[in-house]
Image (cartoon, grey):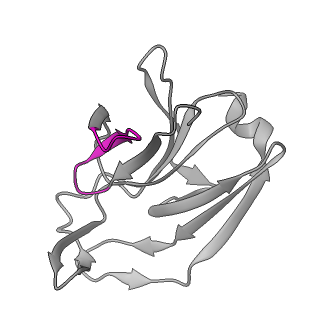
């Protein structure tokens, strides 16, 4: 940010958090589910990959030990936008080409294209894992919503 701060997501918070240059931590918003990646778009909104609480974990020996969360906690994955001015959180997408976004986890925004890293997994009592993939879509698709 221009003031030297950084904005991060806390997946297990679940928060959107601003860490000021002096180390002060400011919780900007609660983001239900599992905010997993964020980037500021050209329109100034913060775009969030939300895994929908697909994962649980514990901090152990300096690393996160992760596993799929219980099915009753899982909310479904989504792409969201948070407006810092209005404080509005808006869900933009929950699916792509008819396939649910089960656990979008990070991305890269450019002025014209957004690349989204997605873990395609169907969370049921018997979890079926599919290989990670990269979605690519025009930035206009996000800005239009």
| Residue 41 found in image quarter | top right
Q: Is residue 96 above or below residue 54?
A: above
Count of marks, rendered view:
0
Residue at far front of view: 22
Q: Position of residue 51 (x, y in %)?
A: 39, 58
Q: Residue at x 34, y 40 (%)?
A: 22
Q: Position of residue 112 (x, y in %)?
A: 84, 44
Residue at far right of view: 112
> Viewed as shown, does residue 123 lie left or right of 133?
left
> Viewed as shown, does residue 137 lie left or right of 10?
right
Q: Main secondary structure of the magenta part?
A: loop
Q: Residue at x 55, y 84 (%)?
A: 131
Q: Is residue 108 above or below residue 124?
A: above
Q: Position of residue 25 (x, y in %)?
A: 27, 40
Does the segment drawn in magenta span residue 18? yes
Q: Is residue 116 above or below residue 25?
A: below
Q: Nearer the viewer, residue 59 or 66?
A: 59
> Residues in magenta?
11-24
């Amino acid at each position: 940010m221009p003031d030297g701060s950084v904005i991060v997501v806390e997946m297990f918070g679940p928060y959107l958090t601003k860490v000021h240059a002096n180390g002060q931590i400011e919780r900007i918003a609660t983001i239900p589910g599992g905010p997993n990646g964020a980037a500021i778009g050209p329109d100034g909104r913060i775009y969030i990959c939300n895994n929908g609480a697909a994962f649980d974990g514990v901090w152990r020996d300096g690393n996160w030990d992760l596993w799929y969360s219980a099915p009753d906690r899982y909310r479904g994955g989504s792409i969201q936008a948070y407006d810092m001015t209005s404080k509005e959180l808006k869900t933009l997408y929950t699916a792509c080409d008819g396939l649910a976004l089960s656990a979008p986890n990070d991305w890269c925004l450019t002025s014209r294209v957004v690349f989204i890293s997605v873990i395609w997994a169907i969370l049921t009592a018997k979890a079926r894992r599919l290989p990670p993939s990269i979605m690519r879509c025009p930035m206009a698709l996000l800005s239009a919503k």
